[in-house]
Every structure is written in C-alpha cells, then in structure tokens.
Image: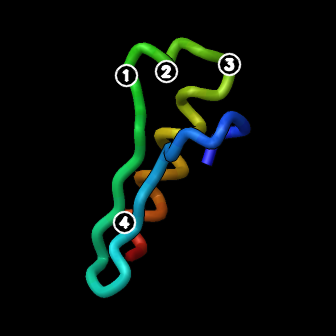
Amino acid sequence: RAEDGTIMAIQHTEYPVHGVQFHPESIASEHGHAVLKNFLDIMESA
C-alpha cells in the first residue's frame, strides 16, 4: 500500500498472478525504469 493507503499491487493467494498499478509515463520519473525492471525480474524468476 501507498502511504495514503492506496492499494498499489496485488498477489493471488493460490496462483502465480501479480498485478501492480503502474503508469508508463512514470518511467520518466527518477526511479521509473528501476521499478519496471525489478517487477519484470521478479516475474521472470516466478
């Protein structure tokens, strides 16, 4: 959850299914590429 309580990601309890709230335009932010890379790395190893 975000600091304001907003749910930013989900994970299924039984299946390898994940979801994140991600806006492609945020790649232009300071850590946007790192966030996307980390997520893709996690999904690749799952």
What label does residue 30 carry, if any?
A: 3
Q: Which mark is residue 24?
A: 1
Mark 2, Cα crowd under 10 Å, few <14 / some 14-19 / many 20+, is some
> Image check: 18 left or right of 8?
left
Helix, strand or loop for disc 1: helix
Identity of the amino acid at label 1? Pro
Please name the residue shown 60% across and 15% down the image.
Answer: 29
Q: Are marks 2 and 1 in contact (CB under 8 Å)?
A: yes
Q: Nearer the viewer, mark 1 or mark 4?
A: 1
Mark 3, Cα crowd under 10 Å, few <14 / some 14-19 / many 20+, is few
What's under tag 2, amino acid-wise? Ile
What residue did someone put label 2 on?
Answer: 27
Give x and y (percent) for residue 45. Answer: 42, 73
Label 4 amino acid? Answer: Glu
Query: Looking at the image, which residue is at 37% across and 81% down?
Result: 13
Sequence-wise, which precedes: disc 2 or disc 4?
2
Q: Circles 1 and 4: CB distance less than 8 Å?
A: no
